[in-house]
Image (cartoon, grey):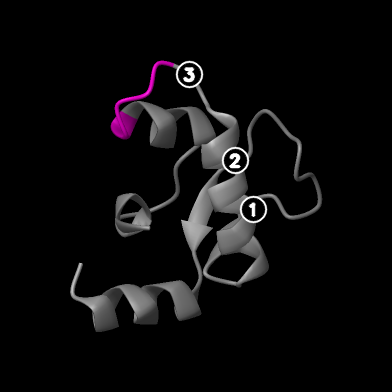
């Protein structure tokens, strides 16, 4: 979640920042869990599979990040 503290990012950029060559299934699963927990949201909620889709922290996610000190 700390990668999203400064704004929204596409999945490919998140993957590269984590040192991966390509988007892994595990990363997709983690993001899906964060979305279902309302910690992260889509920037284009109407089109979750859009190639232009990005992820951003929700208010709940920002509060959790501040609480954890990251």
The image shows residue 12, relative to residue 59, as above or below, that is: above
Q: Secondary structure at mark 2?
A: helix
Farthest front residue in view: 26
For mark 2, what is the residue? 28
Q: Quadrant of residue 64?
A: bottom left
Q: Which residue is most to the top?
A: 21
Query: Could you tell me how far apart the alpha carbons at marks 1 and 2 are, in whole angstroms?
Result: 6 Å
Which quarter shows the N terminus?
A: bottom left
Q: Nearer the viewer, residue 10 or 17?
A: 17
Question: Which residue corresponds to the image point at 52% horizontal and 26% vertical from the top-left?
Answer: 23
Measuring from the top left, give residue 40's x and y in whole percent. 54, 62
Of the numbered discs 1 and 3, the one sitting upstream in the chain is 3
Q: Say which residue label 1 marks.
A: 32
Label 3, on which residue? 22
Between residue 64 and residue 4, name the one nearer to us.
Answer: 64
Label 2 to label 3: alpha-carbon separation: 11 Å
Binning the other alpha carbons within 10 Å of mark 2 as few (below 14), some (14 to 19) or many (20 upward) gives few
Does the residue at mark 1 contact the one at mark 2 (Cβ under 8 Å)? yes
Helix, strand or loop at label 3? It is loop
Instruction: Tell me whether circle 2 and circle 3 mark residues in contact (CB < 8 Å).
Output: no
The alpha-carbon separation of the residues under discs 1 and 3 comes to 17 Å
Up/down of 30 relative to 63, above or below: above
């Amino acid at each position: 979640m700390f990668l999203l503290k400064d704004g929204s990012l596409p999945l490919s950029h998140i993957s590269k920042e984590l040192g991966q060559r390509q988007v892994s299934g595990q990363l997709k699963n983690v993001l899906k869990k964060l979305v279902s927990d309302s910690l992260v949201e889509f920037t284009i909620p109407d089109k979750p599979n859009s190639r232009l889709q990005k992820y951003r922290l929700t208010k709940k996610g920002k509060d959790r990040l501040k609480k954890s000190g990251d």
